[in-house]
Amino acid sequence: MVESHAQTWTTRRGSNPRLETDQLIDIPATPTADDRNNNFGGFFFFPSPSQNVNTALIIFSWYLSNIGVLLLNKYLLSFNGYRYPIFLTMLHMLSCAFYSFIAIHWLELVPYQPILSRRQLLKIAALSAIFCFSVVCGNTSLRYLPVSFNQAIGATTPFFTAVFAFLVTCKKESAEVYCALLPVVLGIVLASNSEPLFHLFGFLVCLGSTAGRALKSVVQGILLTSEAERLHSMNLLMYMAPMAAVILLPLTLYIEGNVAGITLEKAREDGWMIFLLLGNATVAYLVNLTNFLVTKHTSALTLQVLGNAKAAVAAVVSVLIFRNPVTVMGMTGFAVTIMGVVLYSEAKKRSKGANH
């Protein structure tokens, strides 16, 4: 298996998907105060004494789901012996498709947006393929790397976003933005050189996952450019998830063999296995839902700030739970990378302000 600096949905191109946790898809505009106080929040959460309490519960749920899916993936793939990251990703996609359909068509969480043309369908399919690559690489890396190091590598998404924006669209950033990327790269170099559990293949596939998220962000800005084609985040997820599952099905059968039979056999041996997989897939969808809720009740900028902190919190929690060794130099490198991401966000904000 997760992957903005503008304040509105319609201007969100070339954003930082990693800070959206994984990532995934365009985030809608922040609503007005009247919109925030409608019955939507009360439908999904217990009534709270104030809007601030409700927002705090949403942010807590966002942290819980984002960190939870990372830890569950790590437990399944590394400690439980369930070494089938492609099949696990396919379960995530099926879960996202199912819950998205319910949220849009039954609960009417957001307005339904149909696919208007075959061309738009092909564009979404292209995004799904990139999305598959990114999520599969991310889940695979958790077999070989601790969550703390995985999060440190993932924080370098701004670097890959800037690279792909230049290579694909020839978009140049200001000198200040490029300078802010230096500590992002320097930090991951320091963390890699001092990581006790460094694994070359795991490192490379994690880099591939990070690059895939950045590429999807850039390509999405190119493909879904017209107002008619632009989709709300949850509608886009509803279309992308089943396409991704279809792409992953032959891959998991070819690479991972009789994984369905093996899963059933494991379930017979361990009655909790099915519940663990279903819970893992459900939390994977909650990552996307809480992304939307945080932005709805706060702003896209708040989501970026929370994303910066989430990587550090996830790293600390994983070390406490899985007891993977860390070094002072490794923690320093992670801190430098996060500092670079913050500087990058501020530089981008100033650059866009100057352009306007």
Image (tube, rainbow, N blue to C red):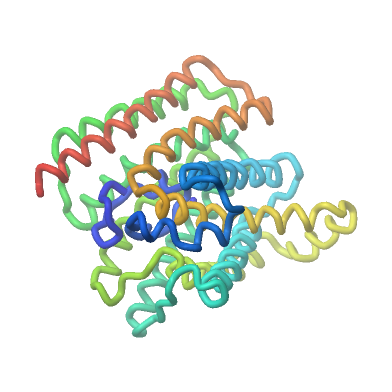
Residue 236 screen position, x and y as percent: 43, 68
- Please, is residue 120 above or below residue 7 in the view? below
* 51 or 271, nearer to the observer: 51
Left or right: 307, with 141 as reference point: left
* 14 or 228, nearer to the observer: 228
Q: Residue at x 41, y 35 (%)?
A: 308
* 136 or 151, nearer to the observer: 151
- Please, is residue 324 above or below residue 37 in the view? above
Residue 292 screen position, x and y as percent: 45, 56
Q: Residue at x 25, y 35 (%)?
A: 346
Give the number of callouts.
Answer: 0
Left or right: 336, with 280 as reference point: left
Residue 86 screen position, x and y as percent: 61, 58
Q: Can residue 246 be seen here? A: no
Left or right: 297, with 74 as reference point: left
Q: Can residue 272 be seen here? A: yes
Identify the residue at the far bottom of this view: 117
Q: Residue at x 28, y 46 (%)?
A: 5
Residue 139 screen position, x and y as percent: 58, 49
Identify the residue at the far right of this view: 269
Left or right: 276, with 219 as reference point: right
Q: Residue at x 75, y 45 (%)?
A: 81
